[in-house]
Image (tube, helix red, strand yellow):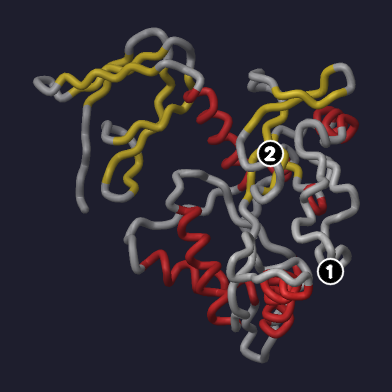
Amino acid sequence: MGLPEQAANNRVLVTGNHSGLKDRKCTDYPELHPTMANVQSDDVPFVTGANPLFVRAATNAGVNYLASDTSQLNQAIEQHFTVSSNKVVLTTNNTARLMVPRYPTNIFYNAISPDVLVSEYNYIFNERFKALGQDPCITAGAVCTPRDYPAILEAEATAAVQHMLSFKKYPHFFHQGNVASYDAAGDTLQFDWLNSVFTAYEKLFKLPVKNDPYYLIGDMTKDSLTAKSATIKAVWNRSTNQVTLSANKSIPKLLVTGVAGGAIYGGQFIREINVDTTPKTIAVNQALTQ
């Protein structure tokens, strides 16, 4: 099936309902708490709400990357964290556990068909606000009028394409029920979502979409955080058509566009280069083909 080898997969942990990263106080679901317009209002967010025993267990198991949910409090940013004095704390130590965010979609975990999705979607984003006497047209997080299945897919595609254009590597996540066939043709909610997203994307761009394994996204995120913490210097000598790169500390696998020896993406070379305090000179090759 093309899944990563087990050794690589063990470095990543996705917990059920992203448990362990905050204290939800048993108020996750709006249908169980109809008087709460915002069911997150009493949550204890990461870091203070995270379970230190969970983080320590992940560390002992050799987990490098913990999946988080960008819709949750303080979980929409890459950050290293560890356990100190039985508390979860942020750290600059790049060998500690790293939170790698993922985007949720409004294709819910318990939805297996368009009818189920439409019913739940309109309850969560429209009907429950009306039941509370609130006007969904002026209430944050609500939709003004109920949506049918095509309108939901269109809204989801717009949001997903915006995520894709944010320069962040975060993937979108789904649930097992979303890949259940809901008709004789084998259609599924997840592939309906994918088709809608790519239809919207291809109206704007020709660049191919990359879908890297999650452990590799973790590796790239770790390298990116290292690069962000450094001071990088690049000098392009136009007479020799060479660029000299250096940094105030070692940066492994710095992605550099427009130099010789890289892989072609979007008509340009992109190359991973190990950069440190010793200047490194490389030939420029923009390879602009589009």
Going 68% across and 39% down the picture, which residue do you hit?
Answer: 74
Residue 282 is drawn in which quadrant? top left
User: What residue did someone put label 2 on?
Assistant: 74
In the rendered image, the vertical position of residue 168 relative to residue 255, given as above or below: below
- Give the camera-side residue of 162 and 5: 162
Picture coordinates of residue 268 (x, y %)?
Answer: 27, 43
Q: How many marks?
A: 2
Going 64% across and 48% down the picture, which residue do you hit?
Answer: 70
Comparing labels 2 and 1, the label whose residue is closer to the camera: 1
In the rendered image, the vertical position of residue 290 relative to residue 50, given as above or below: below
- Amino acid type, residue under disc 2 in the picture: Asn
Label 1: element kind: loop
Going 76% across and 36% down the picture, which residue do you hit?
Answer: 46
Q: Residue pushed farthest left?
A: 239
- Give the camera-side residue of 5 and 125: 125
- Amino acid type, residue under disc 1 in the picture: Glu
**Sequence order check, earlier mark of 2 and 1:** 1
Picture coordinates of residue 177 (x, y %)?
Answer: 75, 71
Residue 118 is drawn in which quadrant? bottom right
Quarter occupied by the N terminus: bottom right
Q: Is residue 117 left or right of residue 151?
A: right
In the rendered image, the vertical position of residue 192 relative to residue 62, given as above or below: below
Going 16% across and 19% down the picture, which residue do you hit?
Answer: 237
Q: Residue pushed farthest bottom?
A: 184
> Residue 31, labelled with which disc?
1
